[in-house]
Image (cartoon, rainbow, N blue to C red):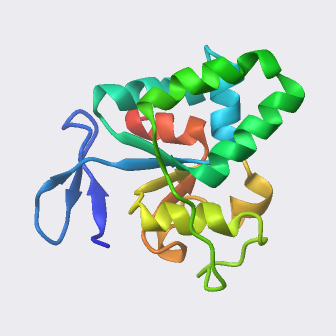
Amino acid sequence: MPKTGWMKPGAGRLSIDSNRGRPVIPIVFLDANVLFTAAHNPSGKSVLIVELGTKGPWRTTTSTFALEEARRNLDIHFPACIPDLESLLRGIDAVASVSGPSCPIDLPKKDQPIFLTALKCRATHLLTGDIRHFGPFMKDPSKTAGMTIMTAADFLSSRSGK
């Protein structure tokens, strides 16, 4: 996977492929908790990421595993919001989940398919609210095969040039 470096604030929103110098659209992988939050909080940061992704500064993607977890949790806590999740999915690519014994970082078994699928998608970012399990790897792409793991709020802050 090529390394990417972000352009200076104000210079654009695309990453630059350092091996070839070509613009690359960031691929933002959404964990289940980001999908869940986007569905039940229509004025929050998670839904903004999806909405902006449909306009082109980045592409949003998720896995079937994350999607099913988000649906299950919405069904338990906010069943009236399931149609909102379905509506959001029009702007999100959903890919088949990957699992296997060879996760390159130390994560609980339930979180490994999220990380492995994000790698398979060549995601530049994995957005999650799971600080407990992903926290040790956040904002350190040297530990995560070049992918940056962060919260939705941190991602938006990084895009605004702050």
Q: Going by the picture, which residue comes out furthest to the left? A: 21
| Residue 45 position (above or below residue 17) | above
Q: Where does residue 55 sit, x and y in percent of width and height?
A: 30, 25
Asked if residue 68 lies left or right of residue 49, the reply is: right
Front residue of this view, candidates 76 and 149: 76
The quadrant where residue 114 appears:
bottom right
In the figure, residue 90 lies in which quadrant?
top left
Quadrant that contains the N terminus:
bottom left
Q: Position of residue 131 (x, y in %)?
A: 74, 53
- Up the image or down, 1 lies above or below 62; here it is below
Write the residue at 58% across / 38% down: 152
Identify the residue shown where x is 50% and y is 61%. 118
In this rendering, is residue 37 above or below 128? Answer: above
Residue 35, given in percent of the width and then of the height, sits at 63, 36
Q: In this view, does 77 lie to the left or right of 110?
A: right
Q: Which residue is drawn at 71% across and 60% down?
A: 135
Left of 112 or right of it: where is 62? left
Q: Residue at x 42, y 58 (%)?
A: 123
Quadrant where the image shows the C terminus: top left
The extreme right residue here reads: 76
Residue 138's spot in the image, x, y percent?
Answer: 61, 60
Q: Nearer the viewer, residue 89 or 145?
A: 89
Which quarter of the picture shows residue 160? top left
User: Compared with residue 15, is residue 160 higher up or lower down, i.e. above or below?
Assistant: above
